[in-house]
Amino acid sequence: MAIENTPTLTPEQHTHFLEHGWVKIPQAIPKEHVDLYTKDLWVRLGYDKNDPSTWEEETFRMPRHREMPWSQFAPKGYAAICEVVGGEDRLDSTLFSKAGDNLIANFGKEEYRDKAVHPRDLGVWHVDGNWFTHFLDSSEQPVLCILLFNDIVPRGGGTFLCEDGLTRIIQWLHERPQGVDRKLVNPDGTSIFDELPTWEKFVECTGNAGDMYICHGFMPHSVSKNHLRIPRFITSPKIVLKEPFKLNREDPKDYSLAEKKILHDLGVSSLPDWKIIGERTHFVAANIKTRDARVPLEVERLKAHAAKTGGVAESIHIHGVVAPEAYGFKA
């Protein structure tokens, strides 16, 4: 189902994105879809929802069992995503076109309850895109989307963003037309994240189930410590463009909001002389194997629960683990 390219974001949200690199869309996902994607959650986990002693792991990614087209799953959120990237027609409909229930869990630890941790000290700062070589104009990760599947309050394990880190990464990529690896590391082993001690503008992604944060794809972010031990569930799905960003458009009105953010943080109106000098390469994401190793056990739990309750086990993996290529990854 196609959407109309009509404005979803307010002028204030446009300005906020240009200044901060992110915008929050309240109730971007209908409640019935949040409920659908979480209804078998505790069965899949094998944990007792009311007994923290059964919560064996702190943070981890779960495989997907359900999926539906983005425009059906989150019409409001999808329309906002399309607006940020310049219209639905710029999206690659052959890659990552469906939103799934591959939740990212954060259960925290008891030792964090009374502990204060500065965002700089979280230790897992990164930019998404572990499946391609990064360039300033890369089309593989135009936006970072964070979808909330439960209410998240401060100190409750919400993702942290770093706004001035985004500006620095944009500048850093501009200086490296040869491209950089998946972890944004230079050939000499130094990294953009060596600059983290100088970054100051941190934002904690809190909100209600169904809310969505749409950030620029270069936004540095980190999982946080779940001090409250309220189980936290999000997804961070991929959105891909058909073509790389165009940073020297003839008509300025044709720039997407994501492209405008790049130019804004570089302090220019266009980049007529910038072009890549390296090779665009793709890989299969390394964390696919870890995540999909959970599939057989989760399917077994779903089947056992269905047999016990007289229900039906619902999973795209019922007849075997779906290959990474089915998610859209290209080796």
Image: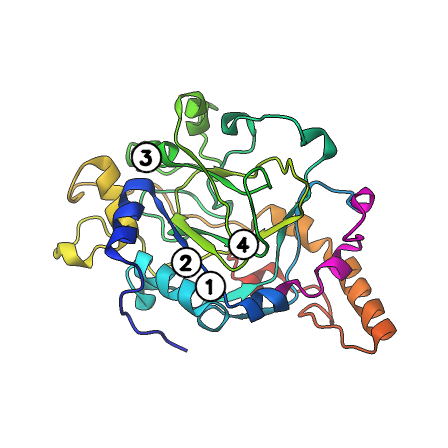
Crowding near the residue tagged with mark 2, few <14, some 14–19, many ≥20 C-alpha atoms within 10 Å: many
Disc 3 + disc 2, Cβ < 8 Å: no
As shown in the figure, which amino acid type bears the numbered disc 1? Leu
State which quarter of the image contains the N terminus: bottom left
Q: Is 29 placed above or below 141 here?
A: below
Q: Is 217 placed above or below 190 here?
A: below
The mark closer to the camera, 1 or 3, is 3
Of pointers 3 and 2, the one earlier in the residue sequence = 3
Q: CA distance from mark 1 to mark 3?
A: 28 Å
Which residue is found at the position 75% from the left and 73% from the top?
A: 313
Per the rendering, the mark at residue 95 is: 1
Residue 141 seen = no
**Occupied quadrant, residue 272:** top left
Q: Which residue is mark 4?
A: 148
The spot of residue 91 in percent (x, y) is 36, 64
Which residue is found at the position 66% from the left and 57% from the top?
A: 63
Q: Provide the residue span drawn in magenta.
A: 37-54
Q: Nearer the viewer, residue 135 or 118?
A: 118
Identify the element where label 3 is drawn: helix
Q: Nearer the viewer, residue 133 or 20?
A: 20
Disc 2 + disc 1, Cβ < 8 Å: yes
Q: Which residue is mark 3?
A: 167
The mark closer to the camera, 4 or 2, is 4
Q: CA distance from mark 4 to mark 2?
A: 21 Å
The spot of residue 265 in percent (x, y) is 25, 37
Crowding near the residue tagged with mark 4, few <14, some 14–19, many ≥20 C-alpha atoms within 10 Å: many
Q: Which residue is mark 2?
A: 240
As shown in the figure, which amino acid type bears the numbered disc 4? Leu
Which residue is found at the position 67% from the left and 30% from the top?
A: 112
